[in-house]
């Protein structure tokens, strides 16, 4: 029996034994044996058209596997995120330092309300939210503490990660918020030349700035923010957490003000 036939037999066996729970295994095995095993090309001597059709037919004969498994996966993801969000909210109330970590903060030093923002420097909605946040901080200077978390959407924003690393590097010299403001105010110019220009305008140590933004520490810090966000269900920017409530998308000043009032009550 060839390797391909063994793979087909295994796929059929798992479908029979595990039914709707076996989608992940089935798809992985199907892909493995359809499109390559140990570097064998599907267009070469490895997989013939007949075998490919046999595997596809097995999947066609069991369409319920796909729907049921997707639903199961979504439910598990949702439950996991809800649990993580509950833990996150409790920590934010009882021991905010565990959530804030090394992230930059602005506003009231001992604010009664903590607003955590997950943001992307290239996101146009984040730039709009930036203007609203400035209004909010000006209106409640002694009440609100804003925490910035990096969440660059690298799949759609090519400059999101470089901008995040540059802002992080500026933060290592105590200039995160000034750098943050400059990036949002010149969002249409995001590029390496702008990052250097802003660093020079803020009188940063350029050698250290370049070294920091290219460092493993920058990558790790941003990855930690993203992991934390993903665990509580962040899938787009801007995304805010405040007093157990979340708000995301095209955020305007009235939205944030209402959220703050709700947190106060």
Image: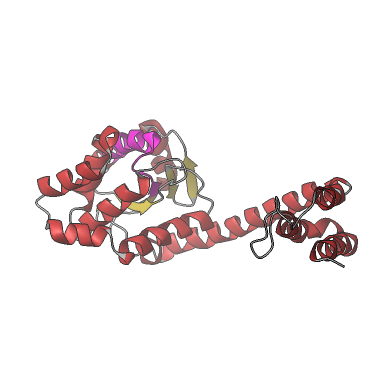
Residue 136 x, y percent position in the rendering: 30, 39
Residue 209 painted magenta? no
Residue 135 painted magenta? yes
Q: Single out the residue that lies furthest toward the left.
A: 203
Query: Residue drawn at (83%, 53%), measured in percent from left and top?
Result: 51
Query: Residue drawn at (20%, 43%), measured in percent from left and top?
Result: 193
Q: Where is the N terminus found, in terms of image quarters?
A: bottom right
Q: Where is the C terminus found, in terms of image quarters?
A: top left
> What color scheme is it?
secondary structure
Residue 210 x, y percent position in the rendering: 20, 57
When the figure is inspected, residue 10 is found, relative to residue 155, above or below; the finding is below
Q: Which of the 4 image quarters holds residue 187?
A: top left
Majority secondary structure in the magenta region: helix
User: As drawn, is 230 to the left or to the right of 70?
Assistant: left
Query: Residue drawn at (69%, 63%), measured in percent from left and top?
Result: 37
Residue 85 visible (yes or no)? yes
User: As drawn, is 124 to the left or to the right of 82?
Assistant: left
User: As drawn, is 226 to the left or to the right of 44?
Assistant: left
Q: Which residues are magenta?
A: 117-136
User: As drawn, is 143 to the left or to the right of 65?
Assistant: left
Number of callouts: 0
Residue closest to the eye, 59 or 123:
59
When the figure is inspected, residue 98 is found, relative to residue 124, above or below; the finding is below
Residue 105 visible (yes or no)? no
Q: Single out the residue that lies furthest toward the front.
A: 45
Residue 147 x, y percent position in the rendering: 33, 53
Q: Which of the 4 image quarters holds residue 99?
A: bottom left
Residue closest to the eye, 116 or 139:
116
């Amino acid at each position: 029996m060839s390797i391909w036939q063994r793979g087909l037999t295994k796929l059929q066996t798992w479908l029979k034994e595990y039914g709707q729970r076996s989608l992940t295994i089935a798809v992985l095995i199907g892909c493995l044996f359809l499109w390559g095993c140990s570097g064998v090309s599907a267009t070469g001597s490895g997989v013939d058209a007949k075998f490919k059709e046999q595997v596809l037919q097995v999947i066609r004969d069991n369409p319920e596997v796909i729907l049921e498994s997707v639903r199961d996966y979504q439910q598990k993801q949702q439950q996991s995120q809800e649990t993580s969000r509950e833990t996150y909210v409790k920590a934010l109330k009882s021991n905010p330092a565990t959530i804030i970590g090394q992230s930059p903060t602005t506003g009231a030093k001992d604010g009664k309300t903590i607003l955590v923002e997950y943001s992307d420097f290239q996101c146009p909605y984040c730039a709009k939210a930036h203007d609203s946040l400035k209004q909010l901080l000006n209106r409640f200077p002694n009440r609100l503490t804003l925490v910035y978390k990096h969440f660059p959407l690298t799949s759609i924003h090519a400059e999101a990660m470089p901008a995040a690393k540059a802002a992080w590097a500026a933060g290592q010299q105590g200039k995160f918020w000034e750098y943050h403001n400059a990036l949002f105010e010149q969002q249409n110019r995001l590029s390496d030349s702008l990052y250097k220009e802003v660093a020079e305008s803020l009188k940063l140590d350029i050698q250290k700035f370049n070294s920091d933004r290219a460092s493993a520490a920058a990558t790790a810090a941003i990855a930690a923010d993203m992991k934390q966000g993903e665990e509580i269900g962040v899938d787009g920017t801007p995304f805010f957490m405040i007093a157990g409530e979340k708000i995301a998308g095209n955020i305007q000043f009235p939205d944030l003000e209402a959220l703050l009032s709700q947190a106060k009550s």
